[in-house]
Image (cartoon, rainbow, N blue to C red):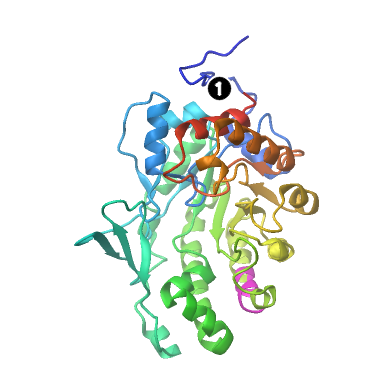
């Protein structure tokens, strides 16, 4: 029987007609089994989301009423999809967002042409008033000449405060009651990335070469703060979450930010400690790990230290061909993302080009299960709503 559609050719069939509910669908994919259809994520993490401008445009295109969306990440300006969008698109995954410097106490100061915000880490951010689509880091609190003593005496955030997860158990139970899969993220960026934000990127990279003790001090502190959060949160939430999300960017468009040798010496052992502890605390949850760019040389290391799910599958980066990734790592890793190129095709292509790109990537990554659909990274403000719908239509075979 033909499906009813709206003005954009958008099907109105309800998700309840499917053989699996959303959580069953996601769990099948995470178990490397083919579900009744490919699971779809939009907005369950801060790396699989949609910019609030694109989100408002999408709602209008779909004929949904205007809303003042909740933001999961104020710095990136990412909207949490409302229930009407979740139902309309058949989104299978929902996210839990603990209170952190990107969504909590984001207090702006008016500084002429831009808004200034200093977060709980002491990191300063600016967002231009006229055309600013997100905030950018402009200064790091521990830049310049410092010693390990500065690191020891710095006033670090209390990442183990139970107030950071207030209400999240109830939210997870509500998602479970609707048959949706649940993802829980942490309260700070990756060990390597967060150290860069606090120290300054160029300075941390120089420390890793010229002052390994200082660099190790930063990485150890980030590990300590991560463990404080997970050791507080997971005993309270592990039984109601399906996926635990971590992130740490190591890739560039063509290569890696640091050599694989340096990764294995300075970062891998600390990530292994972190992932081992998460799995002890949440043995039934799958570990989602986000790292942009060309991380192909590091994938065997990721598998070795316990990564279950790779995100974002940066298909335009060197070495990240989806066919080769599925062939070489499809037994060990679930691929979450890589469904459409967000750098060129999604914002600038035609709807047909979007559909073609989706079908190529899905054909490479989905067979045999082990795949959850999402874009390569967050949908940005300049993406036309008709391209988002074209992406969805291609995913659903329309």
Does residue 68 appear to the left or right of 149 in the view shown? left
- Categorize mark 1 by other alpha carbons within 10 Å: few (<14), some (14-19), many (20+): few
Q: State the image coordinates of residue 349 (x, y, percent, origin top left).
A: 55, 38
Q: Is residue 296 above or below residue 261?
A: above
Q: State the image coordinates of residue 171 (x, y, percent, origin top left).
A: 42, 42
How many numbered dots are placed on residues in this image?
1
Does residue 395 appear to the left or right of 303 in the view shown? left
Q: Nearer the viewer, residue 343 or 220?
A: 343
Does residue 364 appear to the left or right of 50 in the view shown? right
The residue identified by callout 1 is: 16
Which residue in the rendered view is the most extreme toward the right?
327
Does residue 158 appear to the left or right of 194 in the view shown? left
**Residue found 59% across the figure and 59% down from its top:** 291
- Which segment is the magenta one? 265-272
Q: Is residue 181 above or below residue 90?
A: below
Residue 40: tell me if it is visible.
yes
Q: State the image coordinates of residue 148 (x, y, percent, origin top left).
A: 45, 89
Quarter location, residue 303: bottom right
Q: Is residue 253 magenta?
A: no
- For the N terminus, the quadrant is top right
- For the C terminus, the quadrant is top right
Q: Nearer the viewer, residue 368 or 23?
A: 368
Q: Is residue 247 above or below residue 260?
A: above
Q: Nearer the viewer, residue 177 or 13?
A: 13
Secondary structure state at the residue bearing disc 1: helix
The rendered magenta stretch, by its main secondary structure, is classed as helix
Residue 220: tell me if it is visible.
no
**Residue found 35% across the figure and 77% down from its top:** 141
Which residue in the rendered view is the most extreme toward the top?
1
Q: State the image coordinates of residue 67 (x, y, percent, origin top left).
A: 31, 34
């Amino acid at each position: 029987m033909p499906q009813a559609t709206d003005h954009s050719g958008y099907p109105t069939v309800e998700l309840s007609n499917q053989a699996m509910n959303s959580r069953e669908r996601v769990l099948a994919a995470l178990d490397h089994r083919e579900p009744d259809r490919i699971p779809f994520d939009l907005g369950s993490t801060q790396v699989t989301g949609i910019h609030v401008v694109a989100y408002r445009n999408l709602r209008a295109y779909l004929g949904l009423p205007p809303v003042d969306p909740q933001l999961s990440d104020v710095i990136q300006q990412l909207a949490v999809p409302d229930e009407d969008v979740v139902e309309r698109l058949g989104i299978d995954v929902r996210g839990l967002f603990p209170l952190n410097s990107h969504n909590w106490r984001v207090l702006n100061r008016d500084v002429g042409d831009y808004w200034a915000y200093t977060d709980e880490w002491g990191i300063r951010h600016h967002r231009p008033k006229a055309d600013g689509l997100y905030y950018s880091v402009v200064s790091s609190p521990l830049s310049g000449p410092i010693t390990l003593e500065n690191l020891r005496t710095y006033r670090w955030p209390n990442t183990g405060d139970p107030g950071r997860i207030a209400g999240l158990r109830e939210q997870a139970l509500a998602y479970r009651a609707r048959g949706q899969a649940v993802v829980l993220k942490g309260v700070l960026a990756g060990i390597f990335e967060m150290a860069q934000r606090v120290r300054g990127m160029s300075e941390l990279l120089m420390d890793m070469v010229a002052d390994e003790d200082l660099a190790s001090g930063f990485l150890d502190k980030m590990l300590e703060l991560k463990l404080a959060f997970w050791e507080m949160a997971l005993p309270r939430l592990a039984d109601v979450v399906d996926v635990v999300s971590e992130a740490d960017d190591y890739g560039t468009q063509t290569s890696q930010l640091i050599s694989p040798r340096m990764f294995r010496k300075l970062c891998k052992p600390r990530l292994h400690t972190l992932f081992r502890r998460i799995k002890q605390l949440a043995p039934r949850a799958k570990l989602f790990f986000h790292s942009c760019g060309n991380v192909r040389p590091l994938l065997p290391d990721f598998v070795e230290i316990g990564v279950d799910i790779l995100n974002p599958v940066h298909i335009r980066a060197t070495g990240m061909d989806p066919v080769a990734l599925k062939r070489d790592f499809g037994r060990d890793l679930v691929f979450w993302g890589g469904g459409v190129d967000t750098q060129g095709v999604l914002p600038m292509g035609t709807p047909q080009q979007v559909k073609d790109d989706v079908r190529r990537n899905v054909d490479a990554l989905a067979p045999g299960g082990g795949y959850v659909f999402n874009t390569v990274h967050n949908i940005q403000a300049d993406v036309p709503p008709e391209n988002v719908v074209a992406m969805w239509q291609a995913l659903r075979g329309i």
